[in-house]
């Protein structure tokens, strides 16, 4: 993408297009990756509710895969996930591994 | 038809703000500016203005609320002095960086410590590089006129910048003078309807204010702001021309007094310029060619025009009612030196610090300085470049 020069900017850095956060892929910030273990999932959708980045997809009312383009790896979903019989349905794995 | 009254500087500024009738104001009281807001809030209570008045718990909050209201799309003003301006400091840069045309009369007062409520320019000088336009005023009339012009200047679509209007605490804010008021409808027509630029409350066109700008763009935004500063001079001069049409009073980037053929000169801000002009007349009567330059638009500073106006003099004293600590000279002196830097032939410059914390500036102080300048012009010798005057040894 060609960066704009100083003469082409909006006064005061005001952003004029609504909803353009979608262009900013925050997934590259991640150092830990959440992994979904479907076998332990009880479909409570707590993860969907708590995720600050809408990085948990829901399809037909059911928990679907992570959207890794926007998941920052904050770990909130893993913390909140109740899982099944003491077994978490989301675990955080170091990206480097 | 203009109306002539006897009023204090604060009263005149409060009346200008009533005539402007801004959409929103947020303020916190501080001496000697309190009186302006006290008067203005009674205009609000008595239905003389339609302003939404927000009473906040500090000046930091006052400026924050003004920023929000201005970004929302309103014509906004507040008033402060001294510590109040200092407490706003963080938010001043946000107002100018977001390019919000907030107008703020600043009643100049000393900074603590030691605690002092009297006239001194340290407050506004501390904010001189905050990206706000600064207009300085010699008397109540100028404070009234500058306050009205400030709205037209700051709101101009080519610049959109906040404006401070400075006047001397107590000396002007609380002294009664003869002042000419414009008619309410003349002021209304002069400033016109407030025009919005990307207002937050336009829900058909949602916008975001205050995004994070990283190294890939921050410098471009700073360069764009520097470029805008260069457009302020023309906007200020155009506003002055329009203002003259309705008031008959002339304004420029600065005022010169008997300067064209002068050999020695004083550069001085605000009320002390009045005292100095009287003494200059006395020197002229004795055949000494003395003159004066009083800056009006102090930020952005018209370096080129100021240098042109002073370059022919033999000796000039810049009088500062504030010091810039750190082994430096007074702030006005630094700017005047810069304005003359590019000339190979230029006046000899000296700097006097006067009137701090409300210390009187008397005719004999101007006399002393003009005598010293006469001597310097003759001998081309300077004893001390920077010196405090009116101070006990
Ligand atoms: S790690 Fe954070 S950002 Fe990623 S899916 Fe979980 S809650 Fe959302
Ligand atoms: S919080 Fe855990 S258990 Fe609940 S839906 Fe999400 S992954 Fe499944």
Image (cartoon, coloured by chain):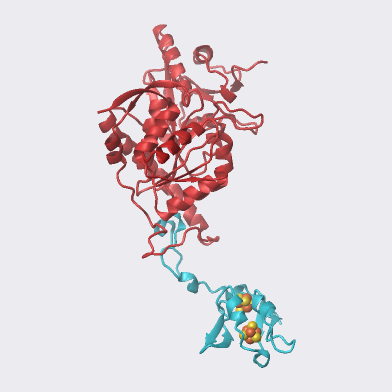
Chain colours: A cyan, B red
Residue B340, percent from left and from top: 47, 30
Q: Is residue B338 visible?
A: no
Q: Is residue B195 left or right of residue B162?
A: left
Residue B257, percent from left and from top: 38, 20
Q: Quadrant of ligand 1?
A: bottom right
The number of numbered discs placed on residues in the rendered structure image is 0
Q: Is residue A64 visible?
A: yes
Please identify the quarter of the rendering in which residue B147 is found. Answer: top left
Seen in the picture, residue B285 relative to B100 is either above or below; the reply is above
Question: Could you say which is closer to the camera, residue B34 or residue B391?
Answer: B34
Please identify the quarter of the rendering in which residue B258 is found. Answer: top left
Seen in the picture, residue B3 relative to A28 is either above or below; the reply is above
Residue projecting furthest to the top: B286
Q: Quadrant of the N terminus of chain B?
A: top left
Question: Could you say which is closer to the camera, residue B363 or residue B290?
Answer: B363
Q: Quadrant of the C terminus of chain B?
A: top right
Residue at horizontal 53%, vertical 14%?
B365
Residue at horizontal 51%, vertical 71%?
A24
Residue projecting furthest to the front: B46
Seen in the picture, residue B51 relative to B369 is either above or below; the reply is below
Q: Is residue B308 left or right of residue A64?
A: left
Residue B380, percent from left and from top: 53, 17
Residue A37, percent from left and from top: 67, 89
Question: Could you say which is closer to the camera, residue B376 or residue B26?
Answer: B26
Residue projecting furthest to the right: A86
């Amino acid at each position: 993408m060609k960066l704009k020069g100083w003469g082409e900017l909006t006064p005061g850095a005001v952003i004029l297009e609504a909803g353009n956060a979608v262009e900013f892929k925050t997934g590259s910030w991640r150092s830990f990756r959440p992994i979904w273990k479907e076998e332990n999932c009880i479909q409570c959708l707590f993860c969907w509710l708590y995720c600050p980045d809408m990085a948990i997809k829901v399809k037909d009312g059911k928990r679907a895969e992570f959207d890794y383009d926007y998941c920052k790896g904050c770990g909130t979903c893993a913390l909140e996930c109740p899982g099944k019989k003491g077994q978490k349905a989301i675990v955080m794995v170091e990206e480097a591994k | 038809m203009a109306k002539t009254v006897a009023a204090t500087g604060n009263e005149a500024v409060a009346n200008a703000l009533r005539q402007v009738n801004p959409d929103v104001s947020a303020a916190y009281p501080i001496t000697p500016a309190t009186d302006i807001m006290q008067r203005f809030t009674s205009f609000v209570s008595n239905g003389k203005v339609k302003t939404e008045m927000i009473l906040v718990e500090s000046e930091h909050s006052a400026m924050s609320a003004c920023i929000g209201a201005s970004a929302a799309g309103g014509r906004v003003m507040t008033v402060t002095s001294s510590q109040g301006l200092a407490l706003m400091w963080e938010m001043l840069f946000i107002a100018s960086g977001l390019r919000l045309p907030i107008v703020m009369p600043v009643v100049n007062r000393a900074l603590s410590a030691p605690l002092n409520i009297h006239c001194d320019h340290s407050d506004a000088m501390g904010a001189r590089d905050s990206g706000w336009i600064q207009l300085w005023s010699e008397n109540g009339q100028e404070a009234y006129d500058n306050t009205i012009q400030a709205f037209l200047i700051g709101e101009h679509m080519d610049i959109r910048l906040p404006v401070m209007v400075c006047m001397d605490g107590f000396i002007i804010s609380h002294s009664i003078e003869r002042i000419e008021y414009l008619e309410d409808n003349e002021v209304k027509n002069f400033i016109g309807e407030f025009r919005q630029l990307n207002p937050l409350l336009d829900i058909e066109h949602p916008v975001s204010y205050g995004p994070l700008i990283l190294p890939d763009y921050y410098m471009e935004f700073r360069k764009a702001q520097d470029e805008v500063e260069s457009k302020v001079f023309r906007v200020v001069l155009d506003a002055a021309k329009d203002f003259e049409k309705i008031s008959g009073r002339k304004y420029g980037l600065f005022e010169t007094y008997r300067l064209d053929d002068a050999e020695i000169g004083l550069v001085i801000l605000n009320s002390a310029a009045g005292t100095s002009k009287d003494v200059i007349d006395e020197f002229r009567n004795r055949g000494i060619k003395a003159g004066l330059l009083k800056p009006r638009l102090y930020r952005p500073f018209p370096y080129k025009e100021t240098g042109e106006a002073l370059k022919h003099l033999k000796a000039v004293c810049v009088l500062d009612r504030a010091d810039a600590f750190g082994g430096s000279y007074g702030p006005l002196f630094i700017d005047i030196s810069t304005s003359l830097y590019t000339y190979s032939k230029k006046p000899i410059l000296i700097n006097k610090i006067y009137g701090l914390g409300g210390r009187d500036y008397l005719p004999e102080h101007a006399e002393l300085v003009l005598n010293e300048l006469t001597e310097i012009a003759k001998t081309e010798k300077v004893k001390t470049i920077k010196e405090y005057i009116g101070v006990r040894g």
